[in-house]
Every structure is written in C-alpha cells, then in structure tokens.
Image: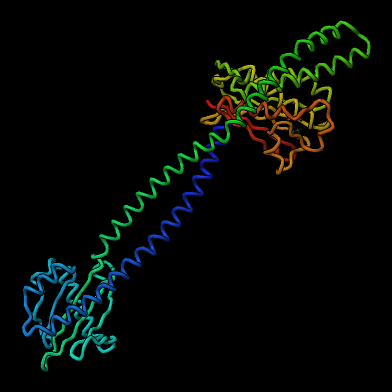
Amino acid sequence: MFQKIRLRLTFLCGGITTLITLAMTLGYLYIAEKNLVANRLLSCQNDIFTIAANLEQQSAISFTWLSKLEAGSGYDISITDNGIPFWFNERIPDDSRLAMTENAWKYYRQNKDALAVHKISYRSSYRNFTYDGKSMGNSPNYCFVISLDTNGSLLEMLLLLPFSAFAGQIAGQRMSFLAMVFAALLAIWLFAWFFTGRLLTPIAESRRKQNQFIAAASHELRTPLAVILSCAESCTNRTMDTIKSEALRMKRLLDDLLTLSSRDLEQLHISKSPVYLDTLLLNACESFEAMARDRRVGLSACLPEDAVPPCDCDRERICQVLAILLHNALSYTPEGGCISLSLSLAPKYFILSCADSGSGIPDEEKEKIFERFYRVEKSRSSKEHFGLGLSIAHEIISAHGGRIAVRDTAGGGSTFVAELPR
Ligand code: ADP
C-alpha cells in the first residue's frame, strides 16, 4: 500500500516538475532562437556597410575578394551589372541553392519599387527582404541587395543568407539544451522517488507498529474470550445467554481485525488449491438456508449448465467472502425479498455474484462501503455489524488477484460481483 502511495506521490511531484520544466524550456528556446536570428541580422547590417565601402573603393571588382568574402561569411553572393548577370554562381554549391538565388532575384525585380531603400552613401544604398522560398521547405531566407551607382551603370549585389545558415546552430542549441533538461528531469524523478520514500518511512513504521499491536491484542483477547464462551456454553439462564452473544460478537470483531491486520502486515495467508466453486456456492447457500427461512427471504443458487473447471483459490477464504456477502444480503433485505447467489464463467474470470432485492446502496456510497469501518448511515444502529465485512472480502479477493464491486440489481437492491482469475 505504501509503495502505491509512494509511486503516486513520485508521479505527482515528478509530473508537475516535468511540466513546469518543459514549459520553461520551450519558452527559453523560443526566446533564444529569436535572439539568435536577430543578432545574426544585426551583424548582416554591419557586413553590408563594410562590403559597400569596399565596392566603392575598388575601381575593378576583385574576384579573389569576392570568393574570400563568400567563403568566410555564409552568404550566397551574386552580382548583376545593369541587370545583366556579372558574377553568378559557378560556386553556388547545389541546384537548390542556385534556384534560391534565382528566385530571390525574381522576387527583387518584381517588388523592387515597393521595398524600402536604406542609404549607405551618396552612391550606394541597400534594400532588404525575406521570402519564404516555398520550394526550399518554407524556411525564411534573408536577402540584402546593395545597389551601387558606378558612373551611370548600376551594379547590384545580392547577399542571400539562407535559413539553413541558422538551422544547424538552432538544432545544436536545441539538442544540447534538451539533453541538459532530460538529465535534470531524470535527477528530479530520482530525487522525488527517494524523497517520498524518506517521507513515508516514519508513517509506514507507525502503521506497522499499530497493526502489530492490533494483531497482538487480538491474539491476547481471544484466549480469555474462548474461556468465557465455553463457560457460558454450559450455563443456561438468560444472563448467560447475553454474555454468550456479546462474547460471540467480540470474537467476530477480533477475527475481523486479525484478518485485516495480517493483510496489512502482508501476512494474510492464502493457500491455493483447485476448488470447485459450484460446490462451494451450494454449500454456502445451504448454511444460510435456515437463516433465510427465519427471515422469510427466498434464497436460490444459479449455476452454469456445463461443468465448471476448478478454480485455483483458498477454499476457506472464498467461503468467508460468500458468507460475508450472504450475511449482508440477508441483513439488508426485508421480509418477502429474494437473494440469488450465482456463478458464471468469463474468458479470464470466474464470476461469483450475490444479488438481493433489498434496500440497495446509493451511488455515492458504492466505493466507500469497501473501506474499513464504513457503514451507510441507516445501518449504524445494528449491533451485529462493524463495517468490516466488505473490506475483508475486498482484501481476500485482491489477494487472489481478482476484484469485487457492487452495482444495482434490476428492479431494486444490490448485486455484489467478485471476479477470480481463471
Ligand atoms: P457491515 O458489517 O456493516 O455489514 P460491511 O463492510 O459488510 O459492514 O458493509 C458496509 C456497509 O455496506 C454496510 O454497513 C451497509 O450499509 C452496506 N451494505 C453491504 N451490503 C449491503 C447490501 N447487500 N445491501 C445494502 N447495503 C449493504
């Protein structure tokens, strides 16, 4: 049980921290990537001023200078003289980059007049634009066209900075940051697991001691109670009857407490053997027949027509579950009602169910009745019931790897369904 709580707390702490960390990481990456692009574009402007100054100073453009510039800057550079290609791209490495440059020129020619002109000197200026070059995977490409008036002819130089120039850097940044975040999250999860373990240790220890105390006290109380019972057995007057019934009540309570504490201490002993559930069910019906007759309640058993294979379970414990269900059904079904105990087979389960036409259980109570000492309000006054029966049934069925639940009986009442693995 504590492992379950520990797991839940770890998931809660780890999950919330993971969400917060991931949200912050995404936010950080978004801002960092925006800044990276902005800084690069800023340095482009500086480049443009330097290149324009160089162009103005050179009487003839040096190809060596151009090649060096292109190799060192990451731009794809191309030049036209009065619109005629002058320096273009044997060196632009592949077809897609070449197409990109051609598209950029096309875009520039079409939109030149609409683009803002930034003056550099009295002879030179530049225009800049972005186009997302659909053929190049929708990434924005940053373009700058420097225009230089050289004694009546117009020299235009396109500097194209493809998005791929950032993509590598951005991907690298993402990978290293995500690796760091992943390592941090791993550490957080490990810490959460360790921390919740430390947190729960004293609680688990005190729960264990409490259970040990209940187990020891129940054991100690049983012996004197057995003596009282056997003495009361031999006496006949009314006072002795009262002593006997009270002592029996106490014995039942002690037995119940013992079963639950041994389950908590993981000492609930389940000794499995092949059991024919149909026979078990008929036996259970038989032992409650007299009680049902006294209370004028009909009791019937319903079994599958075909032979039922044996179920690997603890005979005594399953008998105990059937007794709890039948006892409850008889307690909460008024005179004239009926109870039906049935067995059916599902591919993976044996299904035992106990349906009654009694008072029924409100939907909001259906989960709670399996808790210890929980009783629905109207049954509180009963001296026979401690609110432990169903929690014991639940523990026994869970110890077998099965499950138990309650639903409404058609026409009124409750049906308890216990499933045991085949
Ligand atoms: P109790 O000893 O009080 O019967 P249980 O754990 O067996 O304790 O049941 C818990 C509560 O569930 C009961 O107090 C009762 O209110 C409700 N309950 C159990 N079985 C039935 C039933 N067949 N019909 C109606 N209510 C039921």
Instruction: Name the residue located 91 percent from the left edge and 8 percent from the top edge.
Output: 236
Direction from residue 238 to residue 66 in the image, left or right: left
Q: On the image, which quarter does residue 134 sit in?
A: bottom left
Query: In the figure, is residue 362 to the left or right of 85?
Result: right
278 to the left or right of 22: right
Query: In this rendering, does residue 132 appear at all?
Result: no
Rendered residue at 54%/31% (across/down): 346
Q: Which corner quadrant of the image does residue 35 belong to?
A: bottom left
Residue 265 vs 69, above or below: the answer is above
Residue 66 found in image quarter: bottom left
On the image, the x and y values in percent for residue 233 come to 85, 8
Q: Horizontal and vertical percent for residue 198?
A: 54, 34
Query: Does any portion of residue 250 appear in the rendered image?
Result: yes
Label count reads: 0
* Residue at horizontal 55 percent and vertical 41 percent from the top: 9
Residue at image location 18% in from the left, 85% down from the top: 147
Q: Nearer the viewer, residue 74 or 293?
A: 74
Give the image quadrant in which the ligand numbered 1 is located.
Answer: top right
Residue 316, percent from left and from top: 64, 17
Specify whether 357 is left or right of 201: right
Query: Which residue ends up furthest to the top in the rendered image?
Result: 234
**Residue at far bottom of view:** 152
Vertical arrangement, residue 257 with respect to residue 172, above or below: above
Colour mode?
rainbow
Say which quadrant the N terminus sits in: top right
Who is closer to the viewer here, 404 or 168? 168
Q: Please provide percent x and percent y for residue 41.
A: 28, 73
